[in-house]
Amino acid sequence: MKFTIKSEKPAAVKAGCVVLGIYERRKLSEAASQFDKTTRGLLTSLLKAGDMDGKCGQTVLLHHPRGADCERVLLVGCGKKNEFSDKRYRDALASAADAINRSGASDALSYLPGLEIKGRDTYWKVRQLVEVSIAALYKPDELKSIKDKTSRPLRRVAVNVDSSDTEIAHKALNDGQAIAAGIQLARTLGDLPGNICTPTYLAEQARTLGAGYKQIEVSVLDEAAMEKLGMGALLSVARGSEEPARLITLEYRGDSKDTKPVVLVGKGVTFDSGGISIKPSPAMDEMKYDMCGAASVLGTLKACAEMKLPLNVVGVIPATENLPSGNASKPGDIVTSLSGQTIEVLNTDAEGRLILCDALSYSEKFDPAVVVDIATLTGACVIALGSHAAGLLSNDDKLAEALLSAGTTAADRAWHMPLWGEYQQQLDSNFADMANIGGREAGTITAACFLSRFAGDYHWAHLDIAGVAWKQGKEKGATGRPVALLTQFLLDRCGNDR
């Protein structure tokens, strides 16, 4: 989809569709009011007739409006004006994109970024329009033999802004398209089934990414190389599968070699049966999404390269399957991690922390400024936070605050949870340095406590994305979260250098 910037009066635009906002109780936005005056009260008459009230998410499409040069006008409900918020703006954008795409219009001009949102500027509103519009039109139909094709899909979207804001709006378009491309890559990988998206496939996708951007260098370790390094925790998870594990590293260089990188570690369990501690069969197909942490790292690196961010970023992806077999790890087994610490595996379905702990230890070689790991780690996080926020735990409050702020800006929120020392004792083992689970209580926190034991020498944060990485039910599919949060975090670290 192509995006452009314009500064024109709404009724004078020659476009397939003009998009205007309507507030609840039939109140016209500023652009809608201008359109109404030029068309001699067309919108006022329509609203008085009861065609829409302006509630959030409502849409009404008019064909060939009299007195206007456009083929269609789409009215989008925005809710009460004094309650118009980030979320309602994004909801209005999604409703508009879907309605335009179904209308048959191949191009549109949106006036929605002209709506006022407290604390949000033109850059934010334009970037959100791009990201939300592309996300709204995403379809996970890559493997369907008969695709659901729109007869005339939406191809071009112009965004109307004040003429004084055109420069910043163009920057927002470019950034929004880069982030949307990263989100779409993460969603596409997440939605692929486990028989296609294997650890080897993830490694191939990383190499493809590296081939497309000269700033990215990719390396992949096989099981023999990991065995030589001593990655006993990661390899213990891979033992039950015939698919070989891989440790994938992507190095993005946008700054001098002397600048310490941000390291992103993404959990890449391409299918998680639970191993010997096998999961219940209902919804087990969704365990193909257990590699969404890895997908988000690849998506974030793509966004970085597209924007040519002036910083160094390393992506580390431990990739494996977790399956039961005669070779699989058993409850009670003890394994030795890359750090030398021993782990009693009480539950083989707590495998994510086993592959992440070796990846966290491996990350020390890059002398990182900070390390952030991203993982669909615990069902407890879903119970605690639902599908609205990722769980955030960290050994550095400033790092946690930066991630929280990035999530709020990007509309991809996280929630800070405690990482107090009192929880550590739940991981005590009579037979090893630690157990890999800490009991029923505080499952998200004890999982992070486990990981913290392998991140003691650097600034580290953990994002548990089990509740946000994919949607269930009728709209089942990957969300691409937290690519937007991570990319905003990196943008914030660049400051005024771009």
Image: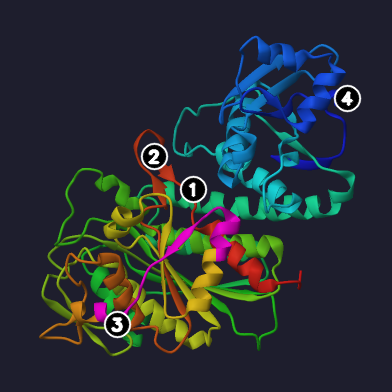
Residue 201 — which label?
Answer: none
Q: Which residue is mark 2?
A: 476
Front position in the image: 224 or 365: 365
Q: Which residue is mark 4?
A: 12
Front position in the image: 11 or 487: 11
Q: Amino acid at mark 1?
A: Thr
Where in the figure is residue 445, as x and y percent of width and height?
30, 70
Q: Secondary structure at mark 3?
A: helix
| Cα–Cα gap, marks 2 and 4 | 41 Å
Where in the figure is residue 266, as x and y percent of width and height?
43, 67
Residue 421 — which label?
Answer: 3
Between circles 2 and 3, the one closer to the viewer is 3
> What residue sits 64% from the left and 28% below the top?
76
Q: Earlier in the sequence, mark 2 or mark 4?
A: 4
For this view, does 471 lie left or right of residue 486? left
For this view, does 61 lie left or right of residue 40? left
